[in-house]
Image: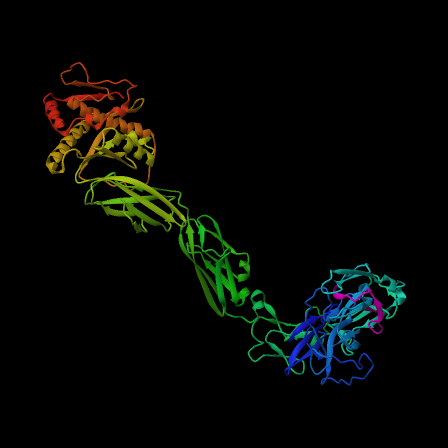
Amino acid sequence: MVDLTEKVEGINGMYLANKLVDNQVKTFLTYNKGQTWALLPAPATDVAGNNLHCILPFCSLHLHLEMSENPYTSGPITSKKSVPGIIVATGNIGTELSSTNLGMFITSDAGNSWRQIFDEEHNIWFLDNGGALLAVLHAAQPIRHLWISVDEGKKWDRHSFSLAPLYVDGVLMEPESENHIITFFGHFSYRSEWQLIKIDYKGIFSRRCMDGDYQTWHLHNKGEMCVMGEKQVYMKRRPGNRCMLAQDYSRIYSSEPCVCTAYDFECDYGWERQTDGKCSPAFWFNPNGAAKSCSNSQSFLNSTGYRKVLSNNCKEGGRNVYSPRRQACRPRPPRGLRLSTSQGELSAAVGSNVTFMVYLEDGDSLRTSIQLDFGDGIRITYSNLSRTNDGIKHIYRTTGIYRVTAYAENSQGSDSSTLFLHITSPVERIYLSAPIVTTKGKEANLTVVVWPSHTRTLTFFWWFDNSSEPIITLEGSISYTFQKEGKNKVTVQVASGNTVMQDSKVITVKEFFRSLLLSFSPALDEHNPDIPEWREDIGRVVSGVPGDQLLVSLYPGLPTTAELFILPDEHIPAEHKRRNDEALETISHIFVTALNQGLIQFELKADIRIIVYITQQTLAPLVDSNSIHSGSAMLMLLSVVIVGLAAFFIYKFKRKIPWIHVQTEDSHEKEPEVISTVSPNDNMSKVKLSEFPTQKELMEKELEARSRGTFTTHFTI
């Protein structure tokens, strides 16, 4: 019941409110949306005509403004847009609002004067678009009568609507319609069923209203004709005329704007209303401070302390005392410079259009220059901030983290703002470059090649063998020492943002081995595609031909080179290391002899023959750390080379391998001797490592071959 406000329908800016004043709840009325408030004058007489002697401000009328809990009753107060100026409410007369001695009160002139119409609480409804009033006693006992007034409550006619008293629970009607039917619903007793009673009240009217049935009345506030900045004249039916109102007749007869006064304005931000009605600056507010609007123009509107009330239609005179005054802007240093992207994100894809937004909270934007440093060596300068309203667009061509800085400067000072923008590029694929053979107990270098090759922030997870935890690095290469002989699987995972890709390689670890670096005729370089799959395919084919003792790693780039690894025989016990080492030395010598004499060659295509040479001999594997290569053209070529090596090796020791046709001739021009032939339909998968000579047999066959002199080999594939 405290500070409860009720908007009066039909009158712009008029409100009723209950306020707590000196521990007493009193009802106040305003005509200008709360600029001024006044107590309600009490009626001169009560409903019986007795004088009340209620004098303001010691005694006044107080109204109940709370909302009804039952939506089918009128509630304690009623006003209607189609009947401007008429308010019917439940209240009491005295020093404060009370719940005793309640009565019904009505005003026909928008609250300037009031009359008492009932000394008990009633529900009041407007009939015929406000042309008549319907009253029903608000009581706990059953009733059978209603009251209707056609003269704004001065006289009431009683009508019986039920033969038996009815407990009325509510009333239904269609507002703003031509339908003259109202429906009462309730029950005869607490145990009875619901009762519906329809009443057609059209019979109380004799005809439709004509022009002569209307009169005008002037809205005023205790004699002041200007309300909400205008003089308004309304039209209503003459009280007592029993004619039906037309639904579309105009309630406002005329409206004329008034000259503005202080009460047509509310105090602006930082200003307070004084007792004389004027607005003065609050103690904490500096009215001469620069306004924010100064950042967009050369001048600004400085408040005079007044702000026109919303919906007020007054017009100022020639002096314009209350309207804001335009003043020239004084230069101010830039303050509160803010830099952000249009979407608020701090990351973007390489090559995309990034829009930067620059904001200045305080300062003269028209006199402040803006410089934006994108962090990639490009800067741009604007003469004033207004030119950056649509944002500043920029495209980054490379990945990385860029420091973007905005500078604002004028004659009074400067300010800056910085953000860090992460330019990323999605990882499309990766390749783990690693040696196929490495020495036990010595470091091996492993490298990950990432496509595309933009600079970016990546995280690398290295998994070795069956380790439960990875080694994490921010670089794409690592050195690792293998402590266990055999085949070791290495897996690397590359994380970029929310994307993770991985690649794996199997590395053969031996305590000792021999390797030969191979080179080829220059003609091979002209047909080398230099792509990664080529090397992997060659390696798989070669390692699958003679078993696990010969492995080949082909290196990227030009000129084309490869490395042949000769591994010790796994069937010889570890304690016979010396015998294994001697066998590897013997096999290596055989290959060196054949390669140095240029005896290994193959036909790449018509009229192009490729010779395989030895470049040098190494004691440890070389690491493939260049970019990945692929291809199928050289798959046949290097296979031919290794097959030739194997054929030469087998010829020397006269071993029969069922998938190579070898012809030889010695220096004494003997007829070629066919060592072995095989049909194209033979199953090559039957070749096993056990069919090749042992290392002991190799040494015996080498001595026998050397006793026969020099030789030449020709291979037909």
Q: Position of residue 591 (x, y in %)?
A: 18, 29
Q: Residue at x 19, y 27 (%)?
A: 690
Residue 545 picture location, percent across and down: 25, 28
- Residue 705: image quadrant is top left
* In front of the other: 644 or 47: 47
Q: Is residue 676 above or below residue 695?
A: above
Image colouring: rainbow
Q: Position of residue 378 (x, y in %)?
A: 44, 54
Which x, y percent locates residue 499?
40, 47
Which residue does the image show at 33% across and 35% down from the upper left? 533
Image quarter where the N terminus lies is bottom right
* Residue sitting at the far top: 671
Above or below for 655 versus 93: above
Residue 320 is at least partly visible in this image: no
Q: Which residues are magenta?
A: 146-170
Magenta stretch containing residue 163, yes or no?
yes
Residue 61 painted magenta: no
> On the picture, is 515 further left or further right than 268?
left
The quarter of the displayed image where residue 172 is located:
bottom right
Q: Is 303 on the left or on the right of 711, as rendered?
A: right
Quadrant in the rendering for residue 379: bottom left
Task: Pick the quarter of the image with the C terminus.
Answer: top left
Q: Looking at the image, can residue 549 be seen? A: yes
Q: What is the residue that sits farthest to the front in this orientation?
A: 191
387 and 70: which one is in front? 70
In the image, 366 versus 455, the foreground residue is 455
